[in-house]
Amino acid sequence: MHLIETGLEGCYVLKPKIFEDQRGYFFESYNQKKFKELTGIDVNFIQDNQSKSSKGVLRGLHFQKGEFAQAKLVRVVKGSVQDVVVDLRPKSKTFGNYFSIELSEKNNTQLFIPKDFAHGFLVLEDDTIFSYKCNNYYNKQSETGIIYNDIDLNINWKEIGVKYKLSEKDLKLTKLKSLFL
């Protein structure tokens, strides 16, 4: 596994070592000991989630507050996404900054997202399967988010030739500024 810094403290890109031959490929998608050695972070993932989406679906930007905040390790099993995270730690020097990366079944890249980050993704291919590990259980009452097109964040979402599809809940999300006033 190879670690790449994102510019947002504690948020990392992880590229696996892939072993390929005429039969196909093999890679270790997660190893807690190696993860801790590379990042210095001792995280205990307790819940795995998976979603399937069509091209143009935009999920997010979501996060859980307080004691239910979640660190996540995300990856794409099939298809591809533009993955975006936003630093929501008010005392961080990168507060309000975002990082974006393409995750796909071809690159097998993963993204570690610390607690107190908003997260979302835009699906770039039909039948994309997105998988993520969480270090805390989901709690509906602590869930909130930021609208994907907040002009203060100025996220450069990809143009993919189809209209974005958002849930009613995601269309009602607020701007970053209103969460921290």
Image (cartoon, helix red, strand yellow):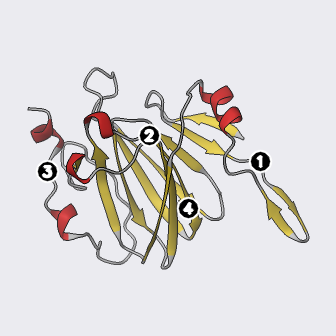
Q: Label 1, on which residue? A: 17
Q: Label 4, on which residue? A: 76
Q: Secondary structure at mark 4?
A: strand
Asked if residue 7 is positioned above or below residue 81 in the image, the reply reads above
Disc 1 + disc 2, Cβ < 8 Å = no
Residue 87 can be seen, yes or no: no
Q: Nearer the viewer, mark 2 or mark 4?
A: 2
Asked if residue 93 is positioned above or below residue 160 in the image, the reply reads above
Name the disc covering residue 174, or none: 3
Q: Label 2, on which residue? A: 71
Q: Nearer the viewer, residue 44 or 31?
A: 44
In the picture, measured across the screen, residue 49 lies left or right of residue 115, that is right
Disc 3 + disc 4, Cβ < 8 Å = no
Residue 148 drawn at (x, y percent): 25, 56
In the picture, measured across the screen, residue 130 lies left or right of residue 166, that is right
Q: CA distance from mark 2 to mark 4?
A: 17 Å
Q: Residue at x 33, y 21 (%)?
A: 93
Which badge, 1 or 4, comes first in the chain's sequence?
1
Residue 140 picture quarter: bottom left
Which badge, 1 or 3, comes first in the chain's sequence?
1
Q: Secondary structure at mark 2?
A: loop
Residue 89 drawn at (x, y percent): 30, 28
The crowding category of the residue bearing disc 4, from other C-alpha atoms within 10 Å (few below 14, some 14 to 19, many at least 20), is many
Amino acid carrying mark 3 in the image: Thr
- In the current view of this chain or complex, which residue is farthest to the right? 22
Q: Nearer the viewer, residue 79 or 31?
A: 31
Q: How many marks?
A: 4
Q: Nearer the viewer, residue 152 or 51?
A: 51
